[in-house]
Image (spheres, helix red, strand yellow):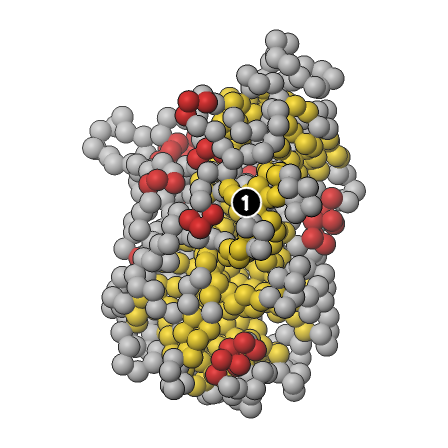
């Protein structure tokens, strides 16, 4: 992971003309942070993070069967909330729920080869019982894909523990790999990931237990890629270069469904996932952080001034492994792919959990929507996402999507069935289910429910019964049946107490006292096949210069299936699951669309409202085979969830 200052991007500050009437960032931040609880104001509780300082990429997730301990580390600056002096913090757990976070770094930049930072790496357990970290050792800065790459500024090094992670010793041979392959002008070369890859072994005619490694980056002016290596089973420091794994050209963008593959990759993981309905079907996948994306204003509003996020994304792709003629090189095709997360999550890093038999990943949820002044007062920056499990989602007997032709949806794999319908497969993710179960059964959790309700044809808002106190830690699960004339449907989360409104229809036993003028809304627009999270902004003049509250926007559609026995068609429900942990909001739609975001102006939750509205039929209808009007199937809220 590179330094923000090396990207050439500058933090946005209000311009001053020298007059005394100009409001400075410091003035505005004092107005917003007029509280003694600055440190805790937006701090999550059940997300994994260090006690203080800056953190970014998750590093070296893994499991040690000898001790039953899970490990996950992270890039960390314990000295302050800014990027710099990057070392590794670490945490251990016996259940991926309760974590013990070490107070001191386990790897520090204290050698000449890693003096500028201990960057992202991976976890490898060997047969001798040792635990090993293979990490990016950085000796020169700045590093960025837009800058010339100094050979040897990024190298690979190893640290080993023989006491189950209590102490770590760096190899005397470090750096064990001195830099990128000879003869290549790279845009980056970092973030090693290592694991067996049986299907890669098969493609190359090697033993199925062969250990492979990838190092992320790109070839300047040619393509982003990840560089493939074979690792000796006898020596973790012996890496034999094979070839670049992909070559799609710069800023390859199959469609809005798949995203922009950019100019440089970071934290690339490879994995093989089997179809859960037919284990004989498998997919080769890459998960990669993308740098150098082109700006796309079609999916959201452009910001003028204020904090802004770098031009990057968190994507995945699936393809076939192919050996190149008679050479020892191999390439991976692009068959389909999409966004692992459409929001502020980045640098996803995964491992295979032998206990749950699932691939689990964490991502870095950034603090980039805050300006430097507020972030400095806060005293910390960044958190890890909830651990997420990933799998292939399969939908059989599909006849179509809401609007798009199936073949144009490049985030899915299509296989035609004998009866003319299709089997649709794509990548899906959701929070680690044992963690979800634990949060739901916390001692003080209160559950609120709404049963099946039909929305009026002219449109209607339905409130969740809310008799409890304000909340900043909750899980919401709701489901809608969409009619063909539905123009928008979703959830509004109110953040302000208001006066009772006796004029509006309500299913509550008492009049609502939530003011939804200041709210977060999750909106699905079927005709646009778009899911949007609108975030509230602070009402103060100039607050947009300090906090980015721009919408999060993602393409999303629903599939219609045909019953092979009755020929009846049915459109899948719109299923929304959301977790709030103070300023962190993680949303999952039908399992296959994930959006992480930050809610800085949404201090409390006082109520929720579910809505559906019909549009002008002259503007078109969607392929939703649901007779009647849009319905809320159910909604359940678990309030005051905690680990």
Q: In the orientation shown, which residue stands out farthest toward the top?
A: 503
**Number of marks:** 1
Residue 40, given in percent of the width and then of the height, sits at 57, 42
* Residue at the bottom extreme of this rendering: 234
Which residue is depicted at the point 53% across and 81% down? 202
Residue 139 percent across, percent down from the top left: 36, 74
The image quadrant where one finds the N terminus is bottom left
Could you say where residue 316 lies in the image, as x and y percent from the top left? 47, 59
Q: Is residue 303 above or below residue 643?
A: above
**Residue sitting nearer the eye, 443 or 400:** 400
Residue 474 is at least partly visible in this image: no
Using the image, determine if residue 471 lies above or below residue 188.
above
**Residue depicted at 53% across the width and 23% down the height:** 613
Q: Can you say whether 312 is above or below 197 in the image?
A: above
Q: Relative to the observer, which residue lies in front, 493 or 367? A: 493
Task: Name which residue lies at 53% across and 47% down.
Answer: 593
Residue 480 visible in the snapshot: yes
Residue 386 appears at what percent x and percent y? 60, 52
The residue indicated by pointer 1 is 399
- The answer to whether 195 appears left or right of 149 in the picture is right
212 left or right of 474 in image: left
- Identify the residue at horizontal 47%, vertical 87% (top origin): 238
Please tell me which residue lies in front, 161 or 466: 466
**Location of residue 281 with respect to 520 vertically, above or below:** below
Label 1: which secondary element? strand
Q: Nearer the viewer, residue 408 or 115?
A: 408
Local crowd at mark 1 within 10 Å, few (<14), some, or many (≥20)? Answer: many
């Amino acid at each position: 992971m590179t330094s923000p200052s090396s990207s050439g991007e500058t933090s946005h500050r209000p311009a001053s003309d020298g007059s005394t009437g100009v409001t400075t960032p410091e003035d505005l931040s004092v107005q917003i942070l007029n509280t003694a609880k600055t440190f805790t104001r937006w701090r999550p509780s059940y997300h994994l993070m260090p006690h203080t300082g800056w953190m970014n990429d998750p590093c070296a997730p893994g499991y040690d069967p000898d001790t039953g301990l899970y490990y996950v580390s992270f890039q960390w600056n314990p000295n302050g909330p800014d990027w710099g002096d990057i070392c590794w913090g670490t945490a251990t757990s016996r259940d991926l729920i309760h974590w013990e976070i070490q107070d001191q770094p386990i790897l520090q930049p204290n050698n000449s080869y890693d003096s500028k930072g201990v960057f992202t790496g991976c976890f490898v357990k060997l047969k001798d019982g040792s635990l090993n970290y293979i990490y990016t050792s950085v000796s020169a800065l700045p590093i960025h894909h837009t800058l010339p790459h100094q050979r040897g500024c990024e190298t690979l090094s190893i640290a080993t523990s023989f006491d189950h992670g209590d102490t770590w010793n760096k190899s005397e041979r470090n750096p064990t790999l001195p830099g990128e392959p000879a003869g290549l002008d790279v845009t980056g070369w970092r973030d090693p990931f290592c694991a067996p890859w049986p299907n890669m072994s098969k493609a190359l005619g090697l033993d199925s237990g062969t250990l492979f490694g990838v190092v992320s980056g790109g070839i300047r002016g040619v393509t982003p890629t990840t560089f493939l290596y074979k690792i000796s089973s006898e020596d973790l420091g012996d890496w034999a270069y094979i070839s670049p794994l992909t070559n799609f050209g710069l800023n390859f963008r199959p469609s809005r469904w798949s995203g922009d593959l950019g100019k440089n990759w970071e934290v690339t993981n490879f994995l093989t996932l089997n179809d859960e309905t037919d284990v004989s079907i498998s997919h080769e996948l890459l998960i990669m952080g993308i740098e150098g994306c082109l700006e796309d204003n079609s999916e959201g509003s452009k910001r003028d001034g204020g904090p802004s996020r770098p031009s990057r994304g968190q994507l995945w792709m699936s393809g076939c492994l192919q050996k190149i003629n008679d050479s020892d090189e191999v390439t991976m095709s692009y068959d389909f792919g999409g966004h692992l997360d459409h929001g502020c999550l980045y640098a996803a890093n995964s491992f295979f959990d032998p206990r749950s038999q699932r691939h689990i990943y964490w991502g870095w949820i950034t603090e980039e929507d805050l300006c430097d002044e507020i972030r400095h007062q806060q005293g910390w920056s960044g958190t890890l996402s909830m651990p997420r499990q990933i799998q292939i989602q399969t939908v059989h007997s599909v006849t179509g999507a809401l609007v798009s032709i199936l073949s144009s949806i490049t985030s899915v794999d299509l296989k035609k069935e004998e009866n003319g319908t299709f089997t649709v497969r794509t990548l899906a993710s959701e929070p680690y289910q044992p963690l979800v179960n634990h949060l739901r059964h916390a001692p003080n959790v209160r559950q609120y429910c709404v049963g099946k309700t039909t929305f009026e044809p002219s449109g209607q808002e339905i409130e969740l019964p809310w008799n409890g106190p304000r909340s900043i830690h909750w899980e919401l699960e709701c489901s809608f049946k969409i009619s063909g004339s539905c123009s928008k449907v979703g959830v509004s989360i109110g953040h302000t107490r208001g006066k009772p409104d006796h004029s509006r229809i309500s299913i509550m036993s008492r009049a609502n006292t939530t003011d939804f003028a200041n709210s977060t809304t999750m909106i699905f627009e079927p005709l646009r096949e778009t899911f949007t999270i609108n975030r509230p902004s602070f009402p103060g003049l100039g607050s947009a210069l300090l906090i980015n509250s721009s919408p999060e926007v993602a393409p999303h559609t629903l599939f219609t299936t045909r019953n092979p026995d009755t020929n009846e068609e049915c459109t899948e429900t719109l299923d929304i699951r959301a977790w709030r942990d103070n300023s962190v909001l993680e949303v999952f739609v039908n399992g296959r669309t994930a959006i992480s975001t930050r809610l800085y102006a949404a201090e409390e939750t006082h109520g929720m409202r579910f809505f559906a509205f019909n549009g002008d039929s002259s503007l078109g209808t969607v392929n939703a085979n649901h007779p009647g009007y849009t319905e809320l199937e159910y909604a359940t809220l678990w309030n005051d969830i905690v680990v």
